[in-house]
Structures are given as C-alpha cells and as structure tokens.
Amino acid sequence: MPPLMDHHQIARELIELESITGNEEPVVAYLEKRLGELGLEVRSEEVAPGRRNLIAGPENPALLFCTHTDTVPPYVPLSEDEEYIYGRGACDTKGITACFLAAGERLLSEGLDDFGYLFVVGEEVDNIGAAAANRSVRCGHVVVGEPTENKLALAHKGALGARVTVEGRACHSAYPAEGDSAIHRLLGYLQKVLRADFGSSELLGPATVNIGGIEGGVAHNVLAPTAAAEVMIRVVSDIREVERRLVECFVDPATGEQDEKVTVEVTLRMESPVFERLEGFEETVVFYGTDAPFLLDVGKLVLFGPGSIVDAHTEGEKISKAAMDEGVESYVRMGRLLID
C-alpha cells in the first residue's frame, strides 16, 4: 500500500493555501484533516479569535514535531521545476510541515507511536501560538522545524526590539533656533546605537543592529515636532544587559542624564536559546529567531529542518525536493532516537 503522506504533494497543497499571519485557519483545517488520516487524536486550542493551535497524538509524548502555520506577506503562488518547489512558505515552513507528516507515517509503520505534533500560529509576528502552547503542552523533546539546511542547529540569536519616540518643537526651518527638530535629535541618537557594543558570543559571533523603520516630520521647511524609529538588536548575551546598553544610548550629552524627550518602548524580548545535540547529525548555528525561546517549558529543544533561511521571506522562496527527501529521513532518525 503506498504511503498516504507524499511530502512533495503535501507541500504543494499547503503552499496553495494562503496563510499570512492572522489567516492561518485554511492551513490549520487542512492539517487537522491530515493528522486525522494518520489516526492521531487531534485537539485544538484557540489562542485568539478565529486562530488556533493544533495538538495531535498522545498526552505528554516523548517527542513533538512543532512548527508554525503562518507565513509572511505577500502571498507568492505555487510553482515548480524539476529541482525545486516554489511559493510562499515553501521553506518557511510548509515544506518542513510536509516532511513532518511523512516522517510520522513512517514512524507509525515501525510501531513507534509515542510522538505527536504541535502546529502554532503567529510565529512571524508575535509568537502568540508558541506562548500559549508553553503554558499547556508538555513532552520529552520538541523538534522545532525551521530551515537549517538539514543541519542540527545548536543555538540561534535572540532579539530585542524597541520603538524609540522623540518629541521636538516645530518651527520655520529658516529659524531653527526657535525650535527643536525631533528628527535631528533622533538621528544623532541612532548613530550611537549603531556604534554601540551589544556583546559577542564565541558560538554566535557579535550582536547586530538594524534600524528597521523611521518616521516623523511634516514638511521640508518645518522642524519636525515628532519622530520615531524601530530598532532590532540580534542578541547573543544577557538580554537585560543589552537592554541597559540600548537605553544608555539615549543619554543627553548636554546633561549626562536620560533625555526626557526620548521614550524607549521595548516591543520584543527573545532570549537566545541553546538546543540539544543528537548523535550522528551535522551541526550549525543560525542567526534568525524562532518560536523556540517561547517553548522552553514544553520540552527539550531541537532545531532542524530542510531548506535555507536565505530563501525565506523572498519573492523566490523555494525548497529543494532532494532536501525534503533528506529531511524526512532525518526526522525518522530523530524519532528512532528520541521515542522510548
């Protein structure tokens, strides 16, 4: 009897379902049906109106295969050639999801059934699904599926996100002494942020900084009354120390005190997690963030998946069919190692 779970075909079907963050339900419903075809008990947990996690298999299993059901925008339709499957979510993480299902069918055929699945919403925005699962789901090991090029990731960078808002005073730009440009003040502080040392790690290298957005002002002939910036630091050391150093960047050089015209609102705190080693797998480190820091209480963490992160979030997102084949075999090997 041929297997039910053709991982290439499942990936195609998943990619054809648009599931940008907030609209995960088409994929969740599809997976609910597929998990039922494996003969697993399937439960769901609503984590926001119209948005739910899926949990399948026994309570407190030895192993959970876990990944997210949402993608970034915009939707990219399915296409294919001899080597690759293309489309939004191909490697992040619909191709991985397909490999999970095919591997699960193989494990069940070998009599290994102490495993299950956890599919969560919201990884690309706020990790709301993982945070909810962390309160209610438990297992021995949780294999977090993200594109690691079929290598076992030992660590990934954390993240500290902040919105910096500056208040100024508008005036005619011909008479700048009459006002206080929030944009000028902000740009000066952001230069300090870009030059700051936010720590380094022997495993992950230096922390990195991105100014991901700047807004403010009203016109080229008016000093800006307000300005704001979005800052993201990829963290490799103690996140509290990184936050302290960030806030220090906004000390008023004239007074030596925190600038009262500047507000720093932390919007994201993601610790840098450490993952389990498994015998027989090539190892790597990755710099991007995942749901893993929000799943610390679920079980011991493993990070692994086919596909490359450099293809994720791009117009040409893709996954190699050969990498998917290897991914299925790798997940089966993990199951044999981790299921009692």
Image (spheres, helix red, strand yellow):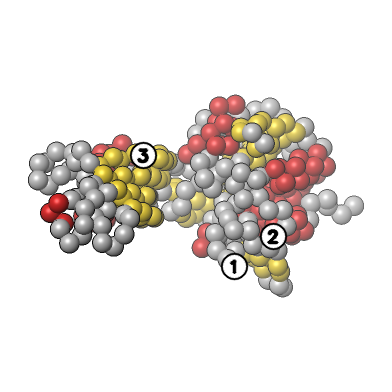
Please provide percent x and percent y for residue 19. 66, 50
Q: Looking at the image, can residue 75 be seen?
A: yes
Let me know if residue 323 appears in the view. Answer: no
Q: CB atoms at circles 3 and 2 under 8 Å apart?
A: no
In the image, what residue occupies the spot 35% across and 44% down?
Answer: 163
Distance from the alpha carbon under mark 3 to that under mark 2? 41 Å
Q: Residue furthest right?
A: 1
The label shown at residue 325 is 2
Residue 148 shown left or right of residue 186 in the figure: right
Horizontal and vertical percent for residue 1?
Answer: 90, 52
Question: Above or below — where is 249 with respect to 139?
Answer: below
Query: Do the CB atoms of the residues marked 3 and 1 lie less than 8 Å apart?
Result: no
Look at mark 1 in the image and give the residue it sits on.
Answer: 316
Which residue corresponds to the image point at 31% horizontal and 44% vertical from the top-left? 165
Q: In this figure, which residue is indicated by the disc labeled 3?
A: 266
Which amino acid type is marked by label 1?
Gly
Q: Amino acid at mark 2?
A: Asp
Residue nearest the viewer, comparing 322 with 17: 17
Q: Nearer the viewer, mark 3 or mark 1?
A: 3
Q: CA distance from mark 2 to mark 1?
A: 21 Å
Looking at this view, is 258 or 304 the one in front?
Answer: 258
Q: Earlier in the sequence, mark 2 or mark 1?
A: 1
User: Measured along the vertical axis of the image, is residue 310 above or below residue 249?
Assistant: below
* Lower sequence index among marks 3 and 1: 3
